[in-house]
Each structure stands twice: as structure tokens, then as C-alpha cells.
Amino acid sequence: MSDTDSTVERSPSDGDDTLHDVIIIGAGLSGIDAAYRLRSENPSLKYLILERRERVGGTWDLFRYPGIRSDSDIYTLSFPFEPWRRPEALASGASIREYVETTAAKHGIDDHIRFGHHVQTANWDSGTDTWTITSRMGGNEQTLRCRFVYFATGYYDYDEPYTPHFPGLDDFEGRVVHPQHWPDDLDHAGKQVVVIGSGATSVSLIPSLAKTAGHVVMLQRSPSYIASMSQEQKINPWIRKLLPPRAAHQVIRTRYAAQTAAMVHGLHRFPKVGRKLLTAGVRKELPEGYPVDVHFNPAYDPWDQRMCMVPDGDLFADITNGTVEMVTDHIDRIDATGITLTSGRHLDADLIVTATGLQLQAFGGIRIRVDDAEIKPHDRFVFKSHLLEDVPNLAWSVGYTNASWTLRADMTARAVAKLLRYMRSHGYTHAYPHLGAQSMTAQPLWDLKAGYVERAPEALPKSGTHGHWRVRHNYYRDAIDHRFDDIEDSMVFGRAPTRV
């Protein structure tokens, strides 16, 4: 990669229809947010969004199981620039997808989306400072070029969820489904259902199944922290009456971000107190004498894994009325009629739902090359939580582990918009973070002890231990750094030696 000065080349907008300033990969929350921020800061920017699915939404289009909803408050999950107008605090997946689609249409972003493009490779050419993006559309291969590539691809494999090996699964005569691939024709009415898993998917799916199923068992190897969140917000309606919609949205959003940050900090600082408070909250929701310590008192400290939120205690209500049963045990084997546990108990089942988690995957599984040399994500440090060490003109949007995804996704979009404006104003055609000769200890990108993180230690890039090379999960500290950011810190800027 050359940093020598030469003639500043023309903008891609000057007549070459195959060359874009930015290609955004993914049309979910992160991709639509990126498009809005990049164009707002750079009005003449020529951009394109490539989306492998047939409509916007990302996660909220992929997951269609009953009860799919946000696992954090919708006010911070929504866009800062587009008010969330519905009343609920935890929103359904369908309403989130509709909100993303409506926002894209309102701001003209949908005109820049090409659907059905499954991106395969991204190859950087240092001679021209361009990325060549190769995608498949149907059976055809297509290539596009851009100056900057923005990965809004999330962090997990859309095609292959995680399903552990269960002895005897092939002997089961009922139906087995994973929530990531929920069939449209699945009828669970009146059936005996066993849901394997204890995370956010299980706690959102089970109350919906319980409405019509004969009986639902939530089978977990070990407990998770689960807390109830009220859907009826008493303060928000008053804020919306007193302030214009956008200002009200900002106040409500700030309130929830601060509330979550305070809770996470408090639980980390005082884990024993936090454990007592959380388990006491569960006891209030359940009948007297219920074995809370067996089913709702995890071995790990609060927020070592993501907290599961349930709207208005719906899961606890179903446990209380008997439509849902909690079972904490290990699977010995699966047979024709259900699941035998190591305790010897047999769970009869017509339907088994394997809510067993995700497979981590960086950059949507797209192969990244720099001058035809493949880049392995785990070999690189992340800089400012979104740039990749020594990889030019590339950004990756990835959210927080202990707060709403969009809080960091929007910060990333604004940081990249600022970087692009700086590059244009100085005539630079490439930029990348460079660690140089300084020694840096590596640590995991995410500080969670969740199974999907621990199963794939080499799936994601590395975090450093200090400076902007350290990936923090602290929204307010990141927001302060973002406001006072030195755009040139640890960055290499330059111009292409060859005019395109």
C-alpha cells in the first residue's frame, strides 16, 4: 500500500457507474443507519447497499419464530434520527422490521438497495485504492467496485445456527426445529413442546407457544438471569406530550441508555447484591415456595452473560398458571417419544425446539483480501471498535454486549462519516489504522462468558488492552471519546498511485 502523493483522482460520482464511494453490505438496522449517517455528512456521496435477502430488516427479517422481539429496550435499539412512536418497551420483531423498512423509504435509502446479492469476496487493490466486491445473485456472479466497504453484516452465521449433538435425535418421531429456521407451516396447537435453551430466544418464544400448546417445558442445563420489564411506560407519554417527536425521542433514548448503563455498572460493581436483587425479583413473580434457586440462580455473576428481559413477567405468569414448566437438568438421550434426562425423568414431546444459540461469524463469512492476500479476522486487532488493523477503507459495525446494538452501530456510522469527510477534504483515497512496532496484548473482542462466544474464540478480530485498540463495552465512555476523537491518531492516510 503506497502512501506517496500523486494526482488526486476524480470522485467515483463523475461518470463511472460501476465505481461507488461506499458499498454497504447488509440492509438491517446497521446498514440503514450507516446509509443515513454517511449521506447526511457527505451529501454528494455515491453509495450502494447490497442485501442478500429480499427485503430490509436483517435479523428482524431472518427470525420469524412466534414471539420474536427485542431483547433490550426498543428506545435505544431504534434509530436516534427516527422516533419510535409505539408505546411498548420491548418491541415485536415484525414491528421492528416494519420500522426499519419505513425509515429506509422515508429517507430515500431504499432506492440505493440491491436485493438478492449474496456477497462472496471483497478484494482490495492498492494500485487503484479500490475494493472489488463479488456477489452471487441467483446463479450469476456480479462484481462492483468501491472506495470504501462498510460491513453491516452482524456477528453470526445466517445459514447455520448452533445445534449440539443430541444422542438419539434421529430416533425422535416428532418434529425438531431451530428458531433461526422456523417453518411457516408449523402447527404447535395442543402439542407437548420441549424448548431446549435458557437464553433470550427461549424466554421470548415460550410464552407465545404456551398460548395454544398443550404444555411447554423449558429445558435448561443451567439457569440464566431473567428480569421482568414493564411494557406500560408512565413517564414516556408525558415526555411525548411536552416535546416535539424528535426531541422527545432523544430524551427517552438518553434516559434508557443511562438507566441500562447504571444497572450494568451497579451489577458488575456489586455482583452479590445484584444476584440477591435479581433472584428476589423473580420470587415476587412466582408462587411462594417455588424453587427459584434451582431454576433462576445462575453460577455466573450478573451481566457475565446478557440479561434476559421478559415483558410484564409473561414467562413467570405462564409458570404460575402451569402452562409452562421449568426443568433444569442434562439430556441423556432423545428417543422416539421425547427426551430422557440424566436424572432419569422422561419428557414426552411432540415437538422439540432447539433454542441452542448462534454460530459466531465475522463479516458475514465474506472472504476479505488485500492485494490478493487473504485476511484472517482473528489475526487483526480492531481499532476504535470498527476499523481493522492495516486493512484500508473498511469498517465493521458491531454492537455492545451489555446495551442495545444500535448505540454502537450509530456511533460507528457517524465515525465513518466523519472519516470519509476528512479524507475527501484532504484528497486522500485510503486510510487504515496501524499499530506499528508497539507491543499489544490481545484479548477477546467480547467480554461475555456466553456459550456462543466461548465456542468460537477465533471467529472474531482481537481487542487490544489500551488506547483505541481496546474494545470497551461502555457506551458513555465511548461517546465521550467519540466527541473528542483525534481522527489522525494511529491512522495512515494516502493517495492511490494509479488513477482509475
Image: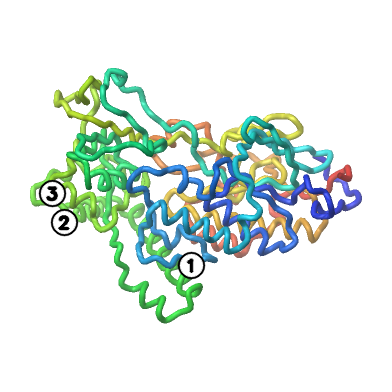
Q: Residues within 10 Å of mark 1 (few under 14, many from 20)?
A: some
Q: Which residue is mark 1?
A: 83
Disc 1 marks a residue whose amino acid type is Pro
**Quarter of the figure with residue 334:** top left
Disc 2 marks a residue whose amino acid type is Lys
In the image: residue 241, left or right of residue 366? left
Q: Earlier in the sequence, mark 2 or mark 3?
A: 2
Q: Residues within 10 Å of mark 2 (few under 14, many from 20)?
A: few
Instruction: Name the element at disc 3.
Output: helix
Of 375 and 492, the residue lying toward us:
375
Q: Quadrant of the N terminus?
A: top right
Which mark's residue is nearer the viewer, 1 or 2? 1
Residue 80 in the image, given as x and y percentages of width and height: 52, 64
**Quarter of the figure with residue 198:** top left
Q: Which residue is mark 2?
A: 284
In this rendering, the answer to whether 338 lies above or below 474 is above
Of 114 and 288, the residue lying toward us:
114
In this rendering, the answer to whether 216 lies above or below 386 is above
In this rendering, the answer to whether 103 lies above or below 395 is below
Disc 3 marks a residue whose amino acid type is Asn
Q: Which residue is mark 3?
A: 321
**Quarter of the figure with residue 95:** bottom left
**Direction right: furthest residue:** 7
Instruction: Name the element at disc 1.
Output: loop
Q: CA distance from mark 3 to mark 1?
A: 37 Å
Cβ–Cβ under 8 Å for marks 2 and 3: no
Q: Earlier in the sequence, mark 1 or mark 2?
A: 1
Q: Residue at x 43, y 54 (%)?
A: 403
Cβ–Cβ under 8 Å for marks 3 and 1: no
Residue 400 in the image, given as x and y percentages of width and height: 47, 50
